Image (spheres, coloured by chain):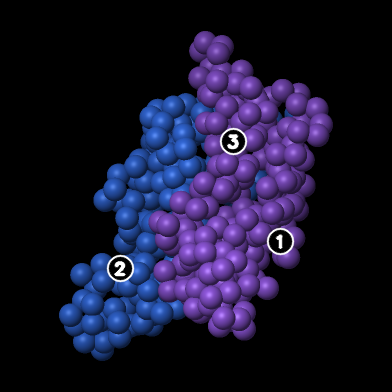
Chain colours: A blue, B purple
Amino acid sequence: MILDAARAQFSERGYEKASVRSIAKAAGVDSALVHHYFGTKEQVFAAAVEVAFAPAFQAPGAVEAGPPEELGERLTRFILGVWENPETRAPLLAIVRSAVNNETAAAVFRDLVTGQVLSRIARGLDLPDAELRAGLAAAQLVGTAMLRYVIKVEPLASVDLEQIVARVAPVVQGHLTADRTRPGRPGTADQAR
Amino acid sequence: MILDAARAQFSERGYEKASVRSIAKAAGVDSALVHHYFGTKEQVFAAAVEVAFAPAFQAPGAVEAGPPEELGERLTRFILGVWENPETRAPLLAIVRSAVNNETAAAVFRDLVTGQVLSRIARGLDLPDAELRAGLAAAQLVGTAMLRYVIKVEPLASVDLEQIVARVAPVVQGHLTADRTRPGRPGTADQAR
């Protein structure tokens, strides 16, 4: 309840203008209660991010359950699935908006996404450059979500999700697992299947 | 001068709260002058986007000049180069912030980026699904820029640009030009070189 109000405040007013007082007012409670449960505005924001990203934080688990050569497809379906569903999209979008607009919000967002999603996926890869791989795979997914669901660039915004999965999943797989040691093919996103 | 003030206003106050009046005040001119030169707030925003994206709008030209098998690398170097330079990054970031936060701003942004960059790159490809290809290539680049320059996720934010180009350029090339007609390899981002 307080976190729903917090997310709405961060979304509508932006991180800077939202305050513990405005969040408490919107939730119909006293500011002291918000401070008691969550602490500072930064901590309220972190809690709101955690709740909004709860579906996405399950990505590492979803990704571990299955054959390694389908890792890219599982991760792609999982992340785009969270964005495809309006109920899980709305809170994500609110948080992304705050993170894009404010450095403090970006830092909170970055620490949570890195700690809860990227680092865990990277650990599963067991490769020396695993964190960079996870970051570039995330970049393809983040950019696809931005252009399809936020900016709504056509035809990306309207094509069937399966068409996107068919093209994006192999790229994600390539970033995560492609053999990068073979000479003469720098950066080749070769396919595991 | 008016457009610098407009960009700053859109960036600081957000699209909704910025007004022709506040932009005129920041530029030290009369509102009537802003209306005379640009029209409505939406039109001022479109003009600010055009100026901020002027470097990126040269992407199609930069991309055309060279061998087709290096298209991905040229486009990657061009777009990440615009983000790498703080002077060209600041105005881009201001506009992206507005577009992420407001539907009207997103529509203006989308129409300009689609019309001036994506459609022109797609025309150069001469393939039936060229616009979807351009969109997915853009998604990898947009996501990389977001995570490296805006959210600043490590190690993506700190690694040498060349490391990123080596991994992203083949993906962009694959999205744009990979043969997608061969059976049994759906979505394979195979490499032209």
Q: Which mark is residue B119?
A: 3
Label 1 CA crowd tier, 10 Å (few <14, some 14–19, many 20+): some
Q: Which mark is residue A86?
A: none
Q: Pick out the residue farthest to the top.
A: B183
Query: Residue A161: horizontal and vertical position, in percent?
Result: 39, 32
3D distance between C-alphas at marks 1 and 2:
32 Å
Q: Mark 2 vs mark 3: give the one in front.
A: 3
Q: Secondary structure at mark 2?
A: helix
For residue A27, above or below residue B186: below
Q: Chain of mark 2?
A: A
The amino acid type found where label 3 is placed reads: Ser
Label 3 CA crowd tier, 10 Å (few <14, some 14–19, many 20+): some
Residue at the spot x=53%, y=75% of the render? B32
Tell me the quarter of the picture where residue A181 sits.
top right
Q: Is residue A58 left or right of residue B3?
A: left
Query: Do the numbered discs 3 and 1 sit on residues whose CB atoms are within 8 Å?
Result: no
3D distance between C-alphas at marks 3 and 1:
22 Å
Q: Secondary structure at mark 3?
A: helix
Disc 1 with disc 2 on a shared chain: no
Q: Is residue A138 left or right of residue B54?
A: left
Which residue in the structure is indicated by mark 2?
A: A8
Q: Which mark is residue B88?
A: 1
The amino acid type found where label 2 is placed reads: Ala
